Image (cartoon, rainbow, N blue to C red):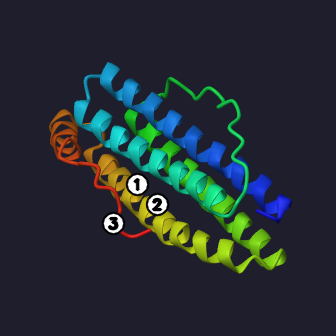
């Protein structure tokens, strides 16, 4: 990759995607500890999606002739006040990732790297979907009001989610 500024930024984002996977795996463990196996499953699927995203960045850097630089992944949180607090943290994290993607696109435009701009467009669409999915869970969780029956039903619903890798790059 001839543009070292973008190469560095893409590598930093690669690390951020792996951090997201690490954070969501930590959340999965948190939900498992609470006996909420459906919530834990939902977070495991989130983990798999973030690993896929990281791999897309990894492959893209290599495809463009760049050098992948893997760095240490910061340790994620391991405790939240409540399931609602944890899912709210997911939404806030996804909003942060959206802003990181937007910043990468701005940099690609500034650097006149049209290929990277096009590559990143997939992630814009993905982030809209990610935020919408988390909002849906958050809204349902709020509706339960922490009620046992509502939590049981939502946990059961979340247990049905399976990871399906995207078929389009």
SS under mark 2: helix
Q: Looking at the rendering, which quadrant does residue 97 occupy?
A: bottom right
Q: CA distance from mark 1 to mark 2?
A: 5 Å
Q: Is residue 41 visible?
A: yes
Viewer-closest of 167 and 26: 167
Viewer-closest of 20 and 34: 20
- The residue sitting at 15% across, 37% down in the picture is 149
- The residue sitting at 70% across, 71% down in the picture is 105
Q: CA distance from mark 3 to mark 2?
A: 20 Å
Q: Write down the residue under mark 1.
A: 134
- The residue sitting at 47% across, 65% down in the picture is 126
| Side of 147 relative to 103 (left or right) | left
Contact flag, marks 1 and 2 (Cβ < 8 Å):
yes
SS under mark 1: helix
Q: Is residue 2 above or below residue 21?
A: below
- The residue sitting at 42% across, 66% down in the picture is 129
Q: Write down the residue under mark 3.
A: 167
Q: Write down the residue under mark 2.
A: 131
Q: Is residue 15 above or below residue 121?
A: above
The percent position of residue 8, horizontal first and vertical second, equals: 79, 52
Number of the front mark, 3 or 2? 3
SS under mark 3: loop
Viewer-closest of 31 and 167: 167
Q: CA distance from mark 1 to mark 3?
A: 22 Å
| Circle 2 crowding by C-alpha within 10 Å: few under 14, some 14–19, many from 20 | some
Number of the front mark, 1 or 3? 3
């Amino acid at each position: 990759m001839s543009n070292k500024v973008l190469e560095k930024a893409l590598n930093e984002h690669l690390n951020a995607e792996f951090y997201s996977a690490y954070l969501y795996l930590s959340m999965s463990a948190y939900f498992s500890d609470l006996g909420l196996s459906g919530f834990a499953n939902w977070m495991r699927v989130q983990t798999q999606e973030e690993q896929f995203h990281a791999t897309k960045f990894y492959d893209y850097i290599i495809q463009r002739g760049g050098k992948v630089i893997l760095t240490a992944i910061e340790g994620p949180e391991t405790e939240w006040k409540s399931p609602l607090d944890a899912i709210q943290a997911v939404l806030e994290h996804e909003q942060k990732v959206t802003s990181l993607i937007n910043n990468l696109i701005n940099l690609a435009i500034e650097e006149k790297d049209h290929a990277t701009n096009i590559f990143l467009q997939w992630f814009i669409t993905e982030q809209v979907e990610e935020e919408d999915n988390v909002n849906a869970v958050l809204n349902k969780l709020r509706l339960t009001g922490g009620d046992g029956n509502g939590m049981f039903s939502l946990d059961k619903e979340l247990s049905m989610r399976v990871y399906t890798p995207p078929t389009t790059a």
